[in-house]
Image: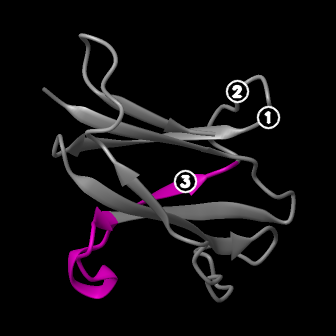
Amino acid sequence: MSTIITVAFTPLTSHDIYELQWKEYPQKWEIDGKSKTINAKEVSKNRNNKIQANIEDLNPGTTYTVRLRVLRVVGSGVGGSATPGKPSPELIIDTEAVSCTPKASQCIIL
């Protein structure tokens, strides 16, 4: 069974590239952190104008720490030459706590 965490956020008009980061709690970001890059211009938004991103292939019954940071400011040039922003506050999510369907477990943060 696959466990997924879905994160939704409202992108800022001044920023277009984001990095969604996650790790098992209480592991170290520098060693065990994983990430995916999200380009706000290339992904669709939901009806509330939020971007939704899935973190997939997680271990069921495990606690994860999730955070988001800006990688590039709009108009900063190709390749994200701007200095990446500071990470958001950490969200700590227990994947065992959300298990209400016979399908794969899925945590949704809006």
Q: Secondary structure at mark 3?
A: strand
Residue type at tag 2? Asn
* Residue wearing tag 3: 38
Q: Are marks 3 and 1 in contact (CB under 8 Å)?
A: no
Vertical placement of residue 16 versus 3, above or below? below
Q: Position of residue 57 (x, y in %)?
A: 21, 41
Query: Does the magenta segment cover residue 38?
Result: yes
**Residue labelled with disc 2:** 46
Q: CA–CA distance between discs 3 and 1?
A: 15 Å
Report which residue position mark 1 lands on.
49
| Amino acid bearing label 1 | Asn
Point out the image quarter for the N terminus. Answer: top left
Residue drawn where x is 27% and y is 83% of the image: 28
- Coordinates of residue 86 in the picture (x, y in percent): 62, 84
Can you tell which of label 2 and label 3 is closer to the viewer? 2
Classify 10 Å Cα crowding around label 3: few (below 14), some (14-19), many (20 and above).
Answer: some
Which of the two residues, 67 or 46, is positioned nearer the viewer here? 67
Mark 2 touching mark 3, by CB under 8 A? Answer: no
Look at 63% across and 62% down and name the residue there.
Answer: 17
Three-letter amino acid code at the position of disc 3: Ile
Q: Are marks 2 and 1 in contact (CB under 8 Å)?
A: yes
Along the line of sight, the residue nearer the viewer: 93 or 66: 93
Residue 88: quadrant of the picture: bottom right
Which element carries disc 2, helix, strand or loop?
loop
Q: Position of residue 46 (x, y in %)?
A: 70, 27
Question: Which one is in front, 76 or 60?
Answer: 60
Q: Nearer the viewer, residue 37 or 47?
A: 47
Q: Which residues are magenta?
A: 23-40
